[in-house]
Image (tube, grey):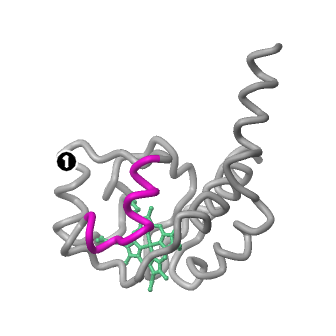
Amino acid sequence: MLIATLAQAQISNTGNAKAGEKIYLKCRSCHVLDQPTNKMGPHLMNLMGRKAGNIEGFEYSAAMKAAGEDGLTWDEDSLKTFLSSPKTMIPNTSMRFWGLWENQIDDLLAYLREKQQD
Ligand code: HEC
């Protein structure tokens, strides 16, 4: 019980899901979060724990596929690195996006976490 409470306190300190929902508007033109539909980008359902470049039917760049085959999995740490500057982490990714500030990423991750619990 105590551990669960502490873990929750920690989660609520790391980001604001309401603010994250606004930040997600930047992603929405290319990504769907609540159903397995690919747009310009692959859907982001159940993103946490997913291997990179692994959604069937989506045409990833060779760079993203290779990153997944090399063991890249999406979790809080890898998403922080990727979203702060996609092309720094994966130089030939086809995701055309400049990146977010660290506090924006914390909020966005809080929102993604909330959506995944639905
Ligand atoms: C202009 C369109 C566009 C925008 C805006 C965009 N993305 Fe992407 N995203 C893509 C494309 C295209 C890919 C596939 C990249 C590749 O294959 O190299 C991708 C890939 C990803 C992946 C890897 C998924 C996987 O299955 O491996 C994640 C995670 C991701 N995007 C998150 C985001 C988030 C979060 C945002 C908003 C902050 C965002 N993207 C904004 C187009 C976009």
Asked if the magenta segment contains residue 83, the reply would be: yes
Residue 102 on image: x %, y %: 53, 64
Which of the 4 image quadrants contains residue 88?
bottom left
**Which quadrant, please, contains the N terminus?**
top right
Residue 87 placement, left or right of 37:
left
Viewer-closest of 34 and 81: 81
Q: Which residue is mark 1?
A: 69
Give amino acid for label 1. Answer: Glu
Taking the image as shown, residue 29 lies to the left or right of residue 75, namely: right
Residue 33, located in which quarter of the rendered image? Answer: bottom right
Q: Residue at x 54, y 69 (%)?
A: 37
Quadrant in the picture for residue 42: bottom left
> Would residue 29 appear left or right of 68 to someone viewing this image?
right
Residue 81 is situated, as x and y percent measured from the top left of the image, at 38, 58
What secondary structure characterizes most of the magenta part?
Answer: helix
Up the image or down, 1 lies above or below 13; here it is above
Q: Is residue 84 above or below residue 96?
A: above
Seen at 27% across and 64% down, the residue is 89
Read off the magenta span. Answer: 77-89
